Image (cartoon, grey):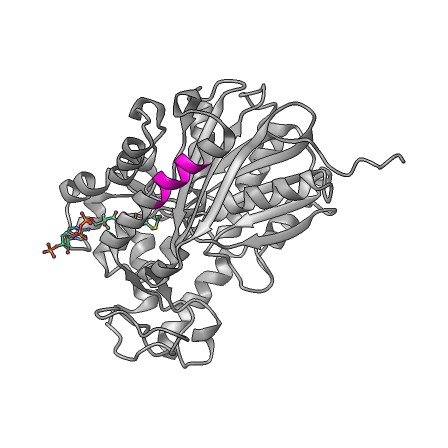
């Protein structure tokens, strides 16, 4: 019997692009609003500055996606599927992938969001590759984008020095030659779920008299550090074994850019020299879902990715989710074209954007506990969301409206 071929043997990355907002927040800027210093931040994290967005997440995603399509010389109408990995989607419903789909004019594309916090792009990559390999779609646009600045607790010096905003995108296409994901491992450390939480986002806060967007973080830095090092190093070793390759066979490691000390510890434990590890957190901070795709695009631009080479991509995020991928890069490392699409100009400095975000949220420490979640009481010392007030809510909504990708 002749069984029709429903599966693609391999999935190549044929296009890539990024979008970084122009306003940059330096460590010196942060020291004007927080009890911190450039010296402390550089010593403990390696981060010197980070981009802060004046637009919403779907707009960053749209610009990155347009560049990835131009790089692949593909038309938006060619795209079968858009997967947006993000934990700061513009809306819960409708999803933000559909905003990217509409802005691009990708009329034939299905659109879905994936949220696994900082690993969202990697989970999106796995999802889209699997759908192509299964024959459900022929190609996919995969985007990782986050604007954690909008949800940042700017009065808490621990998380607020770490994150930046941005988007990175790739175009995946079925192919017959060996390329794309060679092996992948995905997982989640449930015992660490409460160590990293943004309070104020999600339906459990919706009818509790709390302002959506009043975002106070539960953030256990040292525990996240420990989990990230152990989780990414173990995942890296596991995926290399699954792929049947040694660390010496890897051409470049592009890890989640959480913290330089985390990345150095992971490399040490996985037996990989730092010369083989790409880092950009010095200028980008931790871009959450955009961290790895932006680093990948920058590594390509700096000719750090050789045609046909193996890449190792370990990642970690809230949940706490973890992943590691071994990718075989295809033949082409240069774009086929470029896109004229840009972000609207930014009239404000990063510090002015942050000042507006702080003002719209208010800065008083809340005393009301959050709605009870099944199973576990809040950690001692955790900070909880503030009660809603009309005067706080109005500016935040105005900002969302102006951030909307198509002004609707
Ligand atoms: N500036 C100055 N001092 C600070 C700051 C700051 N920004 N943040 C914390 N401190 C202080 C603390 O209050 C503490 O002071 P104390 O000794 O008087 O109590 C001291 O510095 C040491 O604090 P630690 O939390 O032990 O410092 P650590 O070396 O662990 O660094 C950090 C903190 C940078 C958050 C680190 O734990 C880290 O990077 N953790 C991983 C977090 C992360 O990357 N998360 C990203 C999201 S999840 C993901 O992407 C994987």
- Queried whether the magenta region covers residue 234, the answer comes back as yes
Residue at x 55% of width, y 41% of height: 125
User: Is the C terminus in the top left, top right, bottom left or bottom right quadrant?
Assistant: bottom right
- Relative depth, front residue between 282 and 8: 8
Give how far across and how far down residue 343 sits, in percent.
49, 43
Q: What residue is rendered at 58% in x and 64% in y?
A: 93
Give the residues drawn in magenta, as a range: 231-238
Q: Does the magenta stretch include residue 343?
A: no
- Name the dominant secondary structure of the magenta segment: helix
Q: Determine the residue positioned at 74% across, 46% down.
A: 108
Q: Is 203 rendered above or below residue 171?
A: below
The correct choice, above or below, for 218 with respect to 230 in the image is: below
Tell me the quadrant of the picture where the N terminus can be found: top right
Where residue 208 appears, x then y in whole percent?
42, 81
- Say whether residue 62 is visible: no
Q: In the rendered image, which quarter is residue 253 located in?
A: top left
Which of the 4 quarters of the picture holds residue 62?
Answer: top right
Side (left or right) of 390 relative to 329 = left
Give the x, y percent position of residue 60: 50, 46
Farthest right residue? 1
Give the residue drawn at x 29%, y 52%.
224
The image position of residue 187, as x and y in percent, is: 46, 50
Which is more toward the observer, 301 or 267?
A: 267
């Amino acid at each position: 019997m002749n069984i029709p071929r429903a599966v693609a043997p391999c999935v190549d990355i044929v296009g890539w692009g990024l979008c970084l907002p122009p306003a940059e927040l330096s460590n010196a800027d942060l020291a004007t609003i927080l009890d911190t210093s450039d010296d402390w931040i550089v010593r403990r994290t390696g981060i010197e500055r980070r981009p802060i967005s004046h637009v919403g997440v779907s707009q960053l995603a749209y610009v990155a996606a347009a560049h990835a399509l131009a790089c692949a010389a593909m038309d938006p109408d060619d795209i079968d599927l858009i997967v947006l990995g993000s934990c700061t989607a513009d809306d819960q419903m409708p999803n933000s992938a559909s905003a990217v789909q509409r802005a691009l004019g990708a009329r034939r594309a299905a659109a879905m969001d994936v949220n696994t916090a900082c690993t969202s792009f990697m989970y999106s990559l796995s999802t889209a590759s699997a759908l192509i390999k299964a024959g459900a779609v022929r190609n996919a646009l995969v985007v990782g984008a986050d604007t954690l600045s909008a949800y940042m607790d700017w009065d808490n010096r621990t998380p607020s020095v770490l994150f930046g905003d941005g988007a990175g995108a790739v175009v995946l296409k079925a192919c017959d030659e060996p390329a794309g994901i060679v092996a992948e491992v995905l997982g989640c450390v449930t015992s660490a779920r409460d160590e990293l939480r943004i309070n104020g986002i999600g339906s459990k806060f919706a009818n509790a008299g709390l302002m959506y967007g009043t975002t106070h973080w539960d953030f256990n830095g040292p525990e996240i550090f420990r989990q990230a090092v152990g989780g990414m190093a173990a995942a890296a070793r596991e995926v290399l074994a699954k792929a049947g390759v040694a660390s010496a066979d890897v051409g470049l490691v592009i890890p989640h850019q959480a913290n330089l000390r985390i990345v150095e510890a992971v490399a040490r434990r996985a037996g990989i020299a730092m010369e083989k590890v790409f880092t950009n957190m010095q200028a980008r901070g931790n871009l959450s879902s955009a961290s790895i795709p932006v680093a990948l695009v920058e590594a390509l631009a700096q000719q750090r990715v050789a045609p046909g080479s193996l890449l190792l991509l370990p990642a970690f995020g809230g949940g706490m989710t973890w992943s590691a991928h071994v990718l075989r890069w295809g033949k082409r490392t240069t774009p086929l074209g470029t896109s004229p699409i840009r972000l609207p100009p930014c009239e404000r400095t990063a510090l002015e954007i942050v000042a507006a975000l702080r003002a719209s949220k208010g800065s008083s420490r809340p005393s009301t506990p959050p709605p009870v979640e099944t199973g576990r009481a809040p950690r001692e010392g955790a900070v909880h969301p503030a009660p809603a007030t009309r005067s706080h809510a109005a500016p935040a909504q105005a900002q969302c409206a102006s951030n909307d990708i198509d002004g609707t």
